[in-house]
Image (cartoon, grey):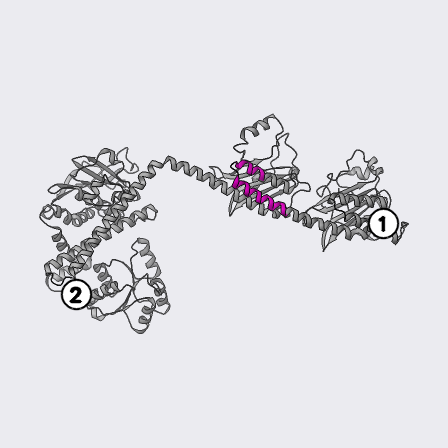
């Protein structure tokens, strides 16, 4: 029902007779209204008494009092009193408080109007009133308090209303407004207390109850009570395989209406009813993750309709239950008198947050139970993994402590002043050998960690397979000689001149194969190293290629039992403890090799027979057409005398290999170091002393600073041709120091990063920051000097040295 009045009808007419009521009667009327409003009764009872008083005192046919449900909510009917005559005329129509609300009135309750012309009364939804009740006049007065419209007072009569009667209504308006505002404040406090109680009860029940279904039933009942809703549901929100959200109920009001719906409810209630249709009001909540208010579901285009026989849906509120940005649940409510609004949504937010916490706790608890079950099923595997890790820790401790013990012992020996020079040299070579072994061990651990974390990067560049084979022989020849083992190598032609792969990782895999072969092969036996191209097996994993390049390492070691082959590539695992005690090792090498093989797109194959030896093969796919598939022929085979020798000791190996390393006197004689000056910024005194010795030997003038700030001061007070800078320093690190130097104008001065961070991404980070080069610790003398020669532009000033020294220097410089 809606009420409209023309603007000129707000002017009081002058041709109507005044009621025969004076000031005394008015005061009495106001006092009676105030007395009734002061009684300790419910708001509905109080205002019904006031409406009855007004109807009786003014002989009005219909009195209606409306109030806001909330501060900003819709108007709801608080009281309605009709005259006996009107009730008789309207016997076919129910004059009950829930007959009409703001939706039926077209939202016109806030308008003010007064008319005595029945033709000016316009009833929008109930023409029965104007056609059959004979109403002639109507009055609508807003009830305001503190500048807000808190309610509406309405009078309707079959006779004209006089200005005096209007004045009586105006006189009691402040009393009615204050009473309604007091009602709103009290109701708001009561609702807040109910909200807090519901939240506290929900949390307490979840903690104490083992039946979580009862907890969620209680939460839904609390929401229905707080909002005076007729029915609803509380559900979790999940995602299907297609990435679409759907809901599965925790609790839902039983609104079954026929045998089929009852059967469906009973069969699925315990596990939760699932709803996947997104073309519904609750579906829109899941799609938008925003509240959905619909006070006219039958006319709402977002609604998908309801099944035949479903209880009436007069209003709907869908609220997303959010945990951060993730929607974990949905609360749906229906059929609240007066409908739903944004104020109610805001009021329920604390309750929704409590629901989110309980739903998330339920999810975590459920996940924990599933995880515990998985852990129980995987108990044996976990125990084996723990045992493997224990073995690894024991092995790694042994592997680390052994070279450290050698380093400590040999260092003490070097300090002995009576030591002869030959003995001192052998001691220093032993120190270097153990240092390198320790560095290789650390590299293995770091590689394994990077692979496990998925951070290993692979390069793709052309490399010669023949060069790889020759490099393996050169690198591992000394170790084979020291054990009296012969390495026979052969190349089965044709093979490609180059392949595209990561040469460093390929070399790492093959070095592991060859190192293991040498380790497990006894003296006076042989190892075969073979390079060939062969067709890809039909059952192989490289089926996308026609041919593959295969590196084979075959030894005459003890062999591996068949039951152990499947576990050979597990990290931290070795065939048995005696292998570790006899040969050493951490059990990481083959695991790293297999992961690297996968990253390179290749495959590792193993054949072994106990007592006869093992064959390890690494196969890389070749692009189609690179190498013709022809009958293989051996076109080259090699076994040099240096590889066959069985009398060369490890000390001789160290002595021979030392000739290819850094020889400071040769470098000093070749380049004019004294024409340059460098600054070394390094916080470690030992590293500074080491570099100072190298530069002193070369004859290179250098200054030293212990941190970045001192380094900047030196750069400002002295001219340098190059700066060698550590990255991790107190006061000011290397990156910040470089940035400050560039800001101060040292834009072209070469600055070389010196760091223990040796990964490829660390190098890329340094170069991107503006460093001219990247050197890693422990410091390699040869790379250090080569970098200095290049950045100081000394190559063009080089002078040939006499004899073999010049040849050695040229070889080193080209490397």
Could you say which quadrant of the image residue 693 lies in? bottom left
Residue 294 visible? The answer is: no
Q: Residue at x 74, y 44 (%)?
A: 41
Magenta stretch, main secondary structure class: helix
Q: Earlier in the sequence, mark 2 or mark 1?
A: 1
Please name the residue that numbered disc 1 is placed on: 165
Residue 808 counted in the magenta span: no
Q: Is residue 754 above or below residue 104?
A: below
Please name the residue that numbered disc 2 is placed on: 670
Quarter of the image where the N terminus is located: top right
Could you say which quadrant of the image residue 659 lies in? bottom left
Helix, strand or loop at mark 2: helix
Q: Residue at x 20, y 56 (%)?
A: 408
Query: In this picture, which residue range is highlighted in magenta?
Result: 192-218
Q: Is 691 left, or right, of 4 in this rendering?
A: left
How many badges with numbers are in the image? 2
Q: Position of residue 356 (x, y in %)?
A: 53, 44
Q: Is 499 left, or right, of 654 in this rendering?
A: right
Residue 205 counted in the magenta span: yes
Q: Which mark is residue 698?
A: none
Report crowding for label 1: few under 14, some 14 to 19, many 20 or more residues within 10 A (C-alpha). some
Q: Is residue 28 above or below residue 809?
A: above
Work out how far the residue at label 2 is from the one at label 1, CA to CA, in angstroms.
Answer: 120 Å
**Closest to the observer: 590 or 40?**
40
Q: Is 383 left, or right, of 696 in this rendering?
A: right
Residue 479 visible? The answer is: yes
**Closest to the observer: 255 or 52?**
52
Tell us which disc is closer to us: 2 or 1: 1
């Amino acid at each position: 029902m809606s009420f409209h009045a023309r603007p000129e009808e707000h002017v009081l007419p002058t041709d109507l007779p005044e009621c025969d009521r004076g000031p005394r009667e008015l005061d009495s009327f106001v006092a009676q209204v105030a007395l009734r409003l002061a009684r300790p009764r419910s708001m509905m009872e109080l205002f019904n008494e006031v409406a009855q008083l007004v109807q009786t005192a003014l002989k009005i046919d219909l009195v209606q009092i409306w109030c806001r449900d909330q501060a900003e909510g819709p108007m709801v009917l608080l009281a309605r009193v009709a005259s006996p005559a009107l009730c008789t005329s309207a016997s076919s129509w129910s004059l009950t408080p829930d007959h009409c609300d703001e939706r039926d009135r077209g939202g016109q309750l806030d308008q003010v109007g007064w008319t005595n012309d029945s033709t000016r009364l316009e009833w929008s939804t109930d023409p029965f009133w104007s056609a059959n009740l004979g109403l002639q006049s109507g009055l609508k007065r807003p009830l305001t308090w503190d500048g807000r419209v808190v309610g509406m007072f309405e009078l309707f009569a079959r006779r004209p209303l006089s200005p005096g009667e209007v004045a009586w209504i105006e006189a009691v308006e402040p009393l009615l407004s204050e009473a309604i505002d007091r009602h709103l404040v009290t109701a708001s406090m009561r609702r807040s207390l109910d909200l807090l109680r519901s939240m506290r009860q929900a949390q307490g029940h979840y903690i104490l109850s083992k039946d979580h279904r009862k907890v969620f039933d209680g939460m839904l009942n609390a929401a229905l009570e707080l909002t005076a809703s007729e029915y609803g549901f509380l559900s979790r929100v999940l995602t299907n395989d297609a990435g679409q959200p759907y809901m599965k109920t925790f609790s839902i009001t039983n609104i079954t209406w026929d045998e089929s719906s009852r059967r469906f409810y009973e069969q699925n209630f315990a596990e939760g009813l699932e709803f996947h249709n997104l073309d519904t009001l609750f579906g829109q909540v899941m799609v938008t993750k925003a509240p959905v208010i619909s006070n006219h579901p039958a006319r709402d285009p977002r609604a998908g309709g309801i099944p035949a026989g479903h209880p009436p849906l007069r209003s709907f509120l869908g609220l997303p239950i959010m945990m951060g940005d993730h929607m974990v649940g949905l609360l749906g409510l229906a059929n609240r008198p007066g409908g739903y609004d944004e104020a109610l949504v805001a009021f329920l937010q604390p309750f929704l947050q409590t629901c989110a916490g309980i739903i998330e706790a339920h999810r975590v608890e459920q996940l924990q139970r599933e995880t515990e079950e998985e852990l129980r099923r995987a108990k044996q595997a976990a125990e084996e993994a723990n045992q493997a890790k224990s073995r690894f820790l024991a092995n790694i401790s042994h592997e680390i402590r052994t070279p450290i013990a050698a380093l400590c012992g040999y260092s003490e020996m070097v300090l002995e002043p009576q030591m002869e020079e030959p003995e001192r040299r052998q001691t220093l070579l032993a120190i270097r050998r153990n240092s390198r072994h320790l560095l290789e061990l650390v590299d293995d651990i770091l590689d394994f960690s990077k692979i496990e974390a998925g951070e290993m990067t692979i390069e793709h560049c052309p490399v010669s397979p023949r060069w790889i084979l020759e490099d393996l022989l050169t690198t591992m020849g000394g170790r084979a000689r020291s054990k009296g083992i012969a390495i026979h190598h052969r190349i089965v032609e044709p093979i490609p001149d180059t392949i595209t792969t990561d040469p460093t990782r390929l070399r790492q895999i093959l070095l592991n194969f060859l190192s293991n072969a040498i380790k497990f092969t006894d003296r006076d036996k042989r190892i075969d190293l073979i390079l060939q191209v062969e067709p890809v097996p039909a059952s192989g994993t490289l089926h996308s290629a026609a041919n593959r390049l295969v590196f084979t390492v075959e030894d005459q070691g003890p062999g591996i039992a068949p039951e152990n082959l499947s576990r050979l590539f597990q990290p931290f695992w070795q065939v048995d403890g005696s292998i570790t005690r006899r040969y050493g090792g951490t059990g990481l090498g083959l695991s790293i090799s297999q992961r690297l093989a996968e990253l390179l797109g290749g495959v590792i194959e193993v054949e072994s027979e106990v007592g006869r030896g093992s064959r390890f093969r690494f196969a890389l796919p070749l692009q189609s057409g690179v190498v013709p598939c022809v009958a293989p022929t051996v076109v080259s085979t090699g076994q040099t005398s240096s590889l066959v020798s069985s009398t060369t000791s490890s000390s001789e190996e160290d002595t021979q290999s030392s000739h290819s390393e850094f020889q400071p006197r040769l470098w000093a004689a070749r380049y004019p170091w004294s024409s340059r000056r460098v600054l070394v910024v390094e916080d470690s005194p030992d590293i500074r002393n080491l570099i100072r010795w190298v530069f002193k030997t070369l004859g290179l003038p250098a200054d030293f600073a212990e941190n970045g700030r001192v380094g900047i001061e030196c750069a400002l007070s002295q001219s340098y041709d190059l700066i060698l800078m550590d990255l991790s320093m107190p006061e000011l690190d290397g990156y910040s120091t470089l940035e400050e130097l560039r800001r101060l104008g040292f834009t072209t001065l070469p600055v070389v990063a010196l760091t223990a961070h040796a990964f490829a991404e660390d190098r890329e980070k340094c170069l991107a920051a503006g460093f001219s080069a990247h050197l890693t610790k422990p410091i390699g003398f040869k790379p250090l000097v080569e970098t200095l020669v290049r950045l100081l532009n000394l190559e063009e000033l080089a002078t040939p040295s006499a004899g073999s020294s010049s040849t050695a220097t040229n070889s080193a410089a080209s490397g």
